[in-house]
Structures are given as structure tokens and as C-alpha cells.
Image (cartoon, rainbow, N blue to C red):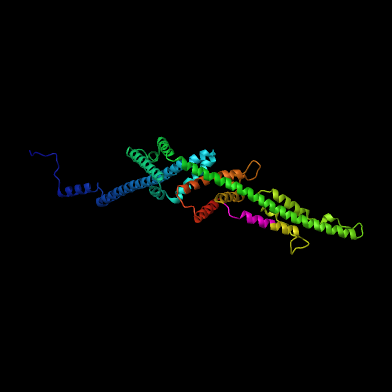
Amino acid sequence: MRFESDHKTLTNADVVREYLKEQTSFDLYPEQHVERNIHDQLNEEYNLMYAQDDIKRAYREYRNAFMEDTREDLLCLALYTTFVSPVLESMYATDRQYDIAADSIKQFVQEQGVENLLNQFQYQSAILSDIGDTVEKYYTHIMEGVDCKIKEGLPEDQACEVEDKTIKSFVTNCKCKCPHDITNTITKRVEDAVNDFIDEKKKSQFKIQQIYQQAKAKVDEYNQANQSFDNMNQTDAPMDGNSMDPEVGIDNNLNAKLDAQQDQDIANLNDPSMQAPPNPTNPGGLSPAQEALAWAKNQEAMILESNYSIFDAMVRVLMEGTYKNDVLKESYMGDNGKTSLEKIINDVKAMYTVLETCNILNLIELNEEYLENMLKEMHDSI
């Protein structure tokens, strides 16, 4: 008996069939599949790399902005704390004046440039050199702390913060650096500027009052002469019901305006409503009363436009701003509903304190060009 195996003997045809069957169970395009996987993987890697670059770039920008702001804030705080604040304290300044002075310091530092000022400090005086070194010392300390926090894994927005104790230490360090003679000098110059401004205003008002009194006297003289002439004509003329009242020839309306002009505030003296009305009987010319009023106004303008101090100029800019800017007008409105000159003077005192501080420390040269530009910028900002 022949032994028969359980396995069937495969023919060549069976082997080929089996091979084809195995081939159809796989991807018929393996090369393209591999290429697609590599492309997707590269895209993911590139996206991750770019995302990391974006994060690094954003951090650098955030950190650089923080560095610039911190250095600027430290310099502003140093100048304010060391020189300006003691002067304001001696003047019993209001919170508003402190805020205005702080804004003026910041504007000055931004205008001059932090780097430029710190370099300038090193060669100007011992006290300014000390201020500059203190700013750089605390700036380095703060930035080292930020980098340390970043390395520990703290988010940038939390790492880029200045601790209160650091600011308090900085302020304490600055407060003891300003000699009393500098503070006293700045204080005296501010007080002198205010007193000179008030004295000049009183003198100007007195001169203007005299001018309008002279103008009124001329009108009165003319009216008296005119009345005498009318009385003489009435004496010679026969009396009847058509006789003219001698008082009709007197321009009472203009006289009243001249009287009221003396009591008005300087800011209201140039009100268009106070212009003399045209004379209907003589449209080509002016009556004696109108001529007197025009002369008085011309003399008044000459007084008001004569040489005045920088403090006076700053007051004028703010006063003019109240007529153009409703927000400013409301800010300087007094209890009587009119513009308060006292409020304007107080604000200008704070600005002028910063200006005199920069002048005394030789941080700027207060020449004519600088002052003109300063007043122009002040005017444009309003």
C-alpha cells in the first residue's frame, strides 16, 4: 500500500496564483505612500519649528519692550522723586498738581531720550551721575530677576513684573540724593515766577483801566461840548413843541459800554460783542465815542501783547484752550460757571516746576527756540 500524504502537492500554477493573492493584499503604490508620510512629517516639524520661533520672537519683543519701559520709568521716577516732589511738597501741591508734574517729567524724558539723558548725566554733575548710576543699578537688578523667573518656568507676563519692595527701595534711595539748596532754588524760582505774573497782571489791569477812563473822559468832554452847543441853540431858537431834548445827542449806549469795559476780566475785554456798532447816520466814519473806544482797544492790545514771561505765556495758552476745548473748559470751570484763573495758575505752577528743574540742572538750554517749540507743542496738544 502506497503511503499518501495529507499535503497536496502544489503545481507551478498554484504557486503563481498564491503569489498574486499575497500581492493584492498590500498597497500597490508603496513609494507614494512613503513620500506622503515624509511630507506630512516634515510639515509638522516645520510648523513646530516656526511656532517655536514665533514664541521666541514674541518673547524677545515683549522683553525688549519691558526693558525700554522699565528703564524709562526708573529715570522718570528718579527725576520726579529726587527734584520735583520736594518742591511740590513745599508748595502744598494738590494731587492734580503731582499728576501734572509727573506727566511733564515723562514727556520731557521721552522727548530727550533715555539713553541720551543717562549718557549726559555722567559728565554733567556728581548728583546727576549718581542718579544715572542708581537707575542703571536697579535696572540691571530687575532684568536679572526677570531672566531668573523665566528660567524657572514662570510665564513672561508674570515674570516681567517689578516687585513693590524694589520700587520702594529705589524711591528711598533717590529721596536722599537731592541737596536742600537745589530744592530751595527751584522753589524760589517758581514762587518768583508766580509773583511776577500776578504783579504784571495787576499793573496791566491798572493801565487798561486808566486807558478806558481816558477814553470815557474824551467822550464825556465831547458830549458836554455838544450839549452846551445844543443849549445855546435852544436859547436862541423859539420854544415850541418840536424842540429837541439836548440829552438825545449824547451816546449813552457807548458810554455805558466804556464804563462796563473797566470792570470786565481781561479775557473778556476782546469779546466781539463789545465792538462798537456802526453809526447809521455816518456809515463812512466813526463817531467820537466809537473813535475813543477804538483807541482804547488799540492801547489795550499793545499792553497785552507787550513782552511777557514764559509763565504768563503758559497761562495764556491754557486760557485760550478753554475757549476752544470743551473738556478743558469744564476742567477749569469755577463755582461761578466761569473759567477759574486760579486753577489754571496752579496747573501751570506744576508744569513750570518741571521746566525750572530741567533748567537748574542744565538738562536743557532754555533758549528762545526751545521755548517757542515748547509753547507750540503745548498749544497743539490742546
Which quadrant is the N terminus positioned in? Answer: top left
On the rendered structure, is 342 left or right of 244? left
Tell how many labels. 0
- Residue 300 within the segment the image draws in magenta: yes
Tell which residue pokes out farthest to the bottom in this image: 284
Q: Residue at x 63, y 49 (%)?
A: 203
Measuring from the top left, give residue 319's x and y in whole percent.
60, 49
Measuring from the top left, give residue 24's x and y in whole percent.
24, 48
Tell which residue pokes out farthest to the front in this image: 181
Give the prevailing secondary structure in the magenta stretch: helix
On the rendered structure, is 199 left or right of 162? right
What residue span does the magenta drawing correspond to?
296-308
Q: Which residue is nearer to you in this view: 15 or 350?
A: 350
Tell which residue pokes out farthest to the top in this image: 165
Q: Which residue is nearer to you in this view: 189 or 121?
A: 189
Measuring from the top left, give residue 10's x and y in whole percent.
15, 45
- Residue 374 within the segment the image draws in magenta: no
On the rendered structure, is 82 left or right of 271? left
- Look at the image and tell me whether residue 300 can be seen: yes
- Look at the image and tell me whether residue 28 can be seen: no
Measuring from the top left, give residue 255's x and y in whole percent.
75, 53
Q: Which residue is nearer to you in this view: 261 or 191?
A: 191
Q: Residue at x 19, y 48 (%)?
A: 19
On the rendered structure, is 108 left or right of 9? right
